[in-house]
Amino acid sequence: MPVIANGLDIEARDAITVTTAIFGATQVVRTEFGARRPALALFRPKSFPASEAPAGVAPRVVEVQAVIRECHRRARVLERSTEVAAGPRLEDAEVVVSGGRGLQGPSSFELLREVAELLHGAVGASRAVVDAGWVPYSLQVGQTGKTVKPTIYIACGISGAMQHTVGMRGAQTIVAINTDPQAPIFKLADLGIVGDALTVLRQLRDELRSRPG
Ligand SMILES: Cc1cc2nc3c(=O)[nH]c(=O)nc-3n(C[C@H](O)[C@H](O)[C@H](O)COP(=O)(O)OP(=O)(O)OC[C@H]3O[C@@H](n4cnc5c(N)ncnc54)[C@H](O)[C@@H]3O)c2cc1C
């Protein structure tokens, strides 16, 4: 059975074509399935909005028996851990407040959490800060992290590398706070603030706290 994974988009007209991204999301590949059916395409969550099935059309569910012989099991589960989560899931949040290396250190994420909580949102992060061990991988947004589509995405101290923006460019409104007016994130932002992210976040937190309700 032909299989393609990590898809970003699909077109199903005469032929079925799946879009994926490679080389750090710098190249887009469109792969057309041949005539063999069934074919299996797996998509990154939130790549596109789910559409209603046309009236009277129900998907056919086919049960497939998958027998995996012991000698073919290369991966083993060594450990399971559950993270304690508060607030909405990053993938489902209407507001995402994300931090990058411009936040200077892991302790700044406490401020990010406060702002996210006041906005009933979730905290996200760039890979640079995940790799630095400031926050867990579960917060990473981007090509090798999660794809988010919130109503508002606030990027704080994030440069806007392609591998990050591929995971958040679908947000309805993007707000960027960065000290560098030339940062690539400003090309994508609906609202850009040139300034120190921590100063702006503190002002935002105080303003939100002062509002009733
Ligand atoms: C194969 C591959 C996959 C990748 N996948 C991902 C991914 O999934 N997600 C991801 O995020 N990255 C990913 N990356 C990494 C990506 O290329 C960038 O390196 C990363 O996104 C940079 O993170 P950053 O913006 O936090 O850091 P930087 O690029 O270092 O940017 C920091 C920004 O902070 C600004 N700044 C500095 N001080 C302040 C301040 N006081 N206030 C405000 N702004 C300030 C700077 O001007 C700068 O723009 C991947 C890379 C590769 C090669």
Image: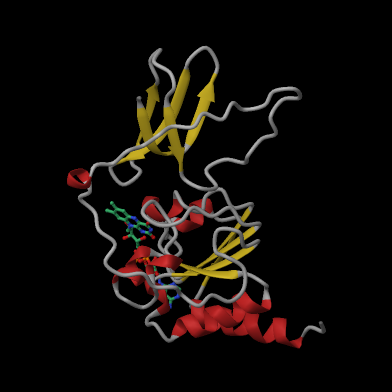
Q: Is residue 114 above or below residue 66?
A: below
Q: Is residue 22 left or right of residue 193?
A: left
- Residue 209 lies in quadrant: bottom right
Q: Is residue 19 left or right of residue 155?
A: left
Q: Residue at x 43, y 66 (%)?
A: 138
Q: How far from the left and from the top, in percent, is residue 199? A: 53, 83
Q: Is residue 156 above or below residue 165?
A: below
- Judge by depth and name the residue closer to the eye, 125 or 31: 31
- Residue 122 lies in quadrant: bottom right
Q: How far from the left and from the top, in percent, is residue 71? A: 17, 45
What quarter of the picture does the N terminus occupy? top left
Q: Residue at x 63, y 39 (%)?
A: 50
Q: How far from the left and from the top, in percent, is residue 89? A: 57, 65
Q: Is residue 3 left or right of residue 13?
A: left
What quarter of the picture does the C terminus occupy? bottom right
- Judge by depth and name the residue closer to the eye, 139 or 98: 139
Q: Residue at x 41, y 70 (%)?
A: 100
Q: Is residue 200 above or below residue 192?
A: below
Q: Residue at x 40, y 20 (%)?
A: 32
